[in-house]
Amino acid sequence: MTLRYLALGDSFTIGEGVPPADRWPMQLAARLRREGVPLDDPQIIATTGWTTDELSAAMDRTALAPPYDVVSLLIGVNNQYRGRSAGEYRLEFRQLLARAMDLAGGLPQRVLVLSIPDWGVTAFGLGCGRDTAQIAQALDVFNAIGRDESQRAHVRWVDITGLSREHSQWLAEDGLHPSGQQYGLWVDAALPLVREVLR
């Protein structure tokens, strides 16, 4: 039986600027198949620029067929970029997390949340005229919320923010989004947690 994967997010999930095969959810599925796990390519609900409420609205418009064997969620960078509040993020992220768990058949261990990468360290971020220390600080607050809510819900949390800072030179041509090589490191971090569930 083929296992099913739903990936929810924004430009980091759709893989802005990289070929479809280099998107991190696609790399994750391909890696697991090579290990003998029959995971299908993900159904991806993600668009560049989406905030938490925009992702939720898109989910309302999309034909979904739960339960999924894996559901991943990576959202929030555009909330921070647009200057939205941390309180609003917590509320809307919590709602998305509840929806993700429902889509995973009510099994929180099948939900994987990735932290928000730091766009301030990219070529785009360094050249955009905004205070990169403030960007990092704001993203740390958003990620603390994401980690807290994920722990409360007993879902799996993968912190890739450090990888985004350490490998900020591995970018797509736009100088903002990660390259396939950096996404591969995200998969390295997520793989043990997903493998544990699907085996």
Image (cartoon, rainbow, N blue to C red):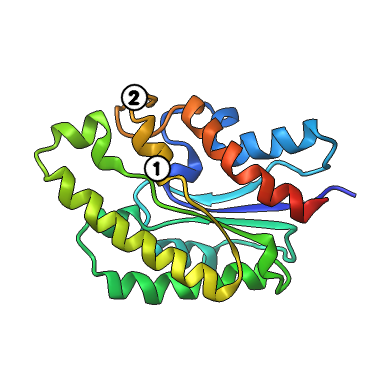
Left or right: residue 84 compared with residue 160: left
Residue 190 lies, in percent from the top left, at: 60, 45
Q: Which mark is residue 64?
A: none
Q: CA distance from mark 1 to mark 2?
A: 13 Å
In the displayed structure, does residue 13 sit left or right of residue 53? right
Residue type marked 1: Gly
Observer able to see residue 53: no
> Which disc is residue 162 wearing?
1
Q: Residue furthest left?
A: 129
Where in the figure is residue 67, as x and y percent of width and height?
Answer: 75, 66
* Of 55 and 3, the residue lying toward us: 3
Camera-side residue: 126 or 51? 126
Name the quadrant containing residue 112: bottom right
Q: Give the residue at mark 2.
A: 169
Closest to the observer, 77 or 20: 77
Please give left or right for residue 127 compared with residue 1 in the image: left
Q: In the image, what residue type sits under mark 2?
A: Gln
